Structures are given as structure tokens and as C-alpha cells.
Image (tube, rainbow, N blue to C red):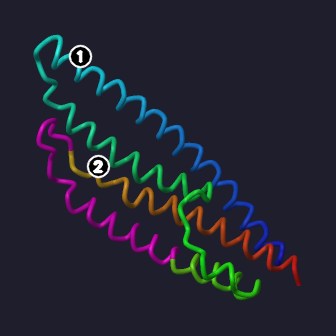
């Protein structure tokens, strides 16, 4: 690999790590907030006999954010479930080519996720949620955000694959 490409890969690695750290902090904060919200809703409903009308809506939005951000954090850590029953039986160079092809196809999907997610978030930006009247862009913004995280992490994985293939020659 050329030094410019190595520097670019180092930049991807740095930003991927930083972005994932922020995502994991957000995951913790949103998860903690959901736990507190659920506890408050149970307390309010059963002890005060008064339901928090907005808690279900906020909880649902939090769950969507946790799902998308959690998926990108899992992808970064390479802990997603993978089906490699056939791939591990192929020769090593074919395994490498398959991994590169899968990453390129994934990056295409992540780019589509960003483009269409941003388009849809913009489309619903003028609409409001039912209980709190929040702009609908907030729940849907996680789609292009997580797509960008996925793409950044995929670029980092691709750089690692290319570096390893360069070292074997």
C-alpha cells in the first residue's frame, strides 16, 4: 500500500474509533434514560394512578435509536452474526476476495441507507409525533446517521483487509 493510502486508512481507523465511542456513550445514555423512563412510568401508573402520556412515544423513539446505533457498534466490534459455512471451506485467496466483495456490497447498501434515510427524514421533517409534537425528523434521523457509521466502519474493515493482503505478498 502506498503511504497516502496508509494515511487515509489510519484516518478511517481514528474516526471510526471516535465515532464508535460516541455511539457507545449515546447507547449507554439512551439505555439508562429508557430504564429511568420505564421506572417512572410504572411508578406513576401504579402508585400515583396517573399514566405519563408521553412515555410510550419517547420509549419507542429510544428503542429505535438503540437498535440502529447498537447495530453499528456491533458491526464495528465485528460481533454481528455471520454465516461463513461455505466461505471457510474455500482456498484462502478466494476467502479474501469474498470478504472484499461482501464489504463492497455492504458499503453500497450503507450508502443507499444514508441517501434514502436522509431523504425520508427530510420528507417527514414537517410532521409531528402524536404525544409530544416533536418533529418526526428526530426518530428517522438515526437511519442516515447509522448508515454513515456503518460506512465508516466498513471502510476501516476494508483498509485492514487490504493491508493484510499487501503484507502476504
Residue 114 higher or lower than 125, as above or below: below
6 or 157, which lies in front?
157
Q: Which mark is residue 123?
A: none
Most common SS among magenta residues = helix
Residue 66 higher or lower than 102, as above or below: above
Query: x and y percent of residue 13 in the render?
Result: 69, 59
Marks 1 and 2: CB-CB under 8 Å? Answer: no
CA neighbours of label 1 inside 10 A, class few (<14), some (14 to 19), many (20+): some
Magenta residues?
Answer: 106-134
**Disc 2 marks which residue?**
139
82 or 100, which lies in front?
82
Quadrant of the image occupied by residue 32: top left
Taking the magenta stretch, the answer to whether it contains residue 19 is no
Earlier sequence position, callout 1 versus callout 2: 1
Instruction: Indicate which label's residue lies in the foreground, 1 or 2.
Output: 1
Query: x and y percent of residue 106 in the render?
Result: 51, 74
**Disc 1 marks which residue?**
43
**Image quarter in which the N terminus is found:** bottom right
Q: What residue is drawn where x is 17% and y is 32%?
A: 54
Quick check: 134 left or right of 78? left
Q: What residue is drawn where x is 30% and y is 26%?
A: 37
Quadrant of the image occupied by residue 61: top left
Query: x and y percent of residue 156 in the render?
Result: 66, 65
Secondary structure state at the residue bearing disc 2: helix
Secondary structure state at the residue bearing disc 1: helix
Query: x and y percent of residue 117 in the render?
Result: 33, 64
Residue 71 higher or lower than 130, as above or below: below
Q: What residue is drawn where x is 66% and y is 67%?
A: 157
CA neighbours of label 2 inside 10 A, class few (<14), some (14 to 19), many (20+): many
126 or 76, which lies in front?
76
The Cα–Cα distance between marks 1 and 2, rounded to whole angstroms, is: 26 Å
Taking the magenta stretch, the answer to whether it contains residue 131 is yes
Amino acid at each position: 500500500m502506498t503511504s497516502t493510502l496508509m494515511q487515509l486508512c489510519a484516518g478511517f481507523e481514528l474516526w471510526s474509533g471516535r465515532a464508535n465511542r460516541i455511539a457507545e456513550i449515546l447507547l449507554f445514555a439512551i439505555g439508562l434514560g429508557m430504564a429511568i423512563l420505564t421506572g417512572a412510568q410504572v411508578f406513576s401508573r401504579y402508585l400515583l394512578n396517573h399514566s405519563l402520556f408521553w412515555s410510550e412515544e419517547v420509549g419507542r423513539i429510544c428503542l429505535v435509536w438503540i437498535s440502529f446505533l447498537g447495530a453499528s457498534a456491533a458491526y464495528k466490534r465485528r460481533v454481528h452474526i455471520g454465516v461463513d459455512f461455505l466461505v471457510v471451506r474455500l482456498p484462502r485467496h478466494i476467502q479474501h476476495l469474498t470478504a472484499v466483495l461482501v464489504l463492497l456490497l455492504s458499503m453500497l447498501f450503507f450508502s443507499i441507507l444514508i441517501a434514502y434515510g436522509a431523504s425520508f427524514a427530510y420528507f417527514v421533517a414537517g410532521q409531528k409525533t402524536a404525544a409530544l409534537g416533536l418533529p418526526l425528523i428526530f426518530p428517522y434521523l438515526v437511519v442516515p446517521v447509522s448508515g454513515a457509521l456503518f460506512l465508516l466502519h466498513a471502510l476501516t474493515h476494508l483498509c485492514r483487509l487490504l493491508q493484510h493482503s499487501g503484507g502476504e505478498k
